[in-house]
Amino acid sequence: MKKGFTLVEVIMIIAIISILGAVAIPALTGYVDKADETEIKQHLATCVEAIQTWGTERYADDRIGQGQLVFPVNPDSEDPSHPAVPYAPSFSPYKANNWLSLVDEYSNLNLSPSIWSITEVRFDDRNKLVRLALHRNDFGQTALYTAEGVYNDGGGGDPGGGGGGPDPPGTSIHYDVVFDSQGGSAVATQRVLKGSTAVKPDDPYPPSDPSWEGYSFDKWCRDKAGLQPYDFSSPVTKSITLYAKWREP
């Protein structure tokens, strides 16, 4: 007669599966994160080559950057969600998603604007591309190209962004730290260099609803319920959302 498992055997099997899961899941997560980083770096390299080619072709006629930020700067954009570059005669055909369109034209790398966006472009006065940021919208992940000797004073790969100091030359990965004030005043997202720390922002104001009268800001937490306080000295290794916890009167 065939016997089933004893209670001790079942407990041992469950324990073994738990141990294997504890080892395998972090390893798998790390593998996926590494693959995502590799993909965005490869796409960034293609974007750099394509946009630099475009800039080089126009050196004789257009001084694109003059050492200033080329994008995003354009108050006359027809679509505020996808600004156009400042006026350049050779760039006039491009409006919404123009940088992605340019990359597609020069490299056939067809990046979907619903997933990808180019968030910063900077040329020097000889049309050399010195900064380019490619952002993956769904992951809150940014790959930043910075030429040797060119730094962003704001740090963090985003003007006014998070900590970490000047961006190093070469390619670096950045992650978004999003602040959800849960009805309070808005707090800007910080784009933080991988392994660096976010900067604790100024305390938000409580919601203007009369029912919130007397409430004050307490702390930033990893969860909406406010049970897991966030440590701003901890390194940022992935995109995160922090939630405001409010102190009752």
Image (cartoon, helix red, strand yellow):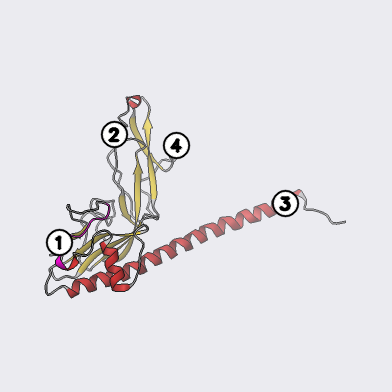
Name the image quarter holding residue 210. top left
Circle 4 is placed at which residue position?
Answer: 225
Q: Which mark is residue 205?
A: 2
Circle 1 is placed at which residue position?
Answer: 87
Does residue 34 appear left or right of residue 61 in this picture? right
Magenta range is 81-89
The mark nearer the N terminus, 4 or 1, is 1
Mark 2 or 3: in front is 2
Residue 191 visible to the viewer = yes
Q: Which mark is residue 10?
A: 3
The mark nearer the N terminus, 2 or 1, is 1
The mark nearer the N terminus, 2 or 4, is 2
Q: Amino acid at mark 4?
A: Ala
Query: Does 154 lie within the magenta span?
Result: no
Does residue 173 appear left or right of residue 6 in this picture? left
Q: Amino acid at mark 1?
A: Tyr
Vertical order, 238 against 130 (above or below) = above
Which element carries disc 2, helix, strand or loop? loop
Which element carries disc 4, helix, strand or loop? loop
Query: What residue occupies the far right of the structure in this picture?
Result: 1
Between residue 167 and residue 128, name the one nearer to us.
128
Q: CA distance from mark 2 to mark 1?
A: 39 Å
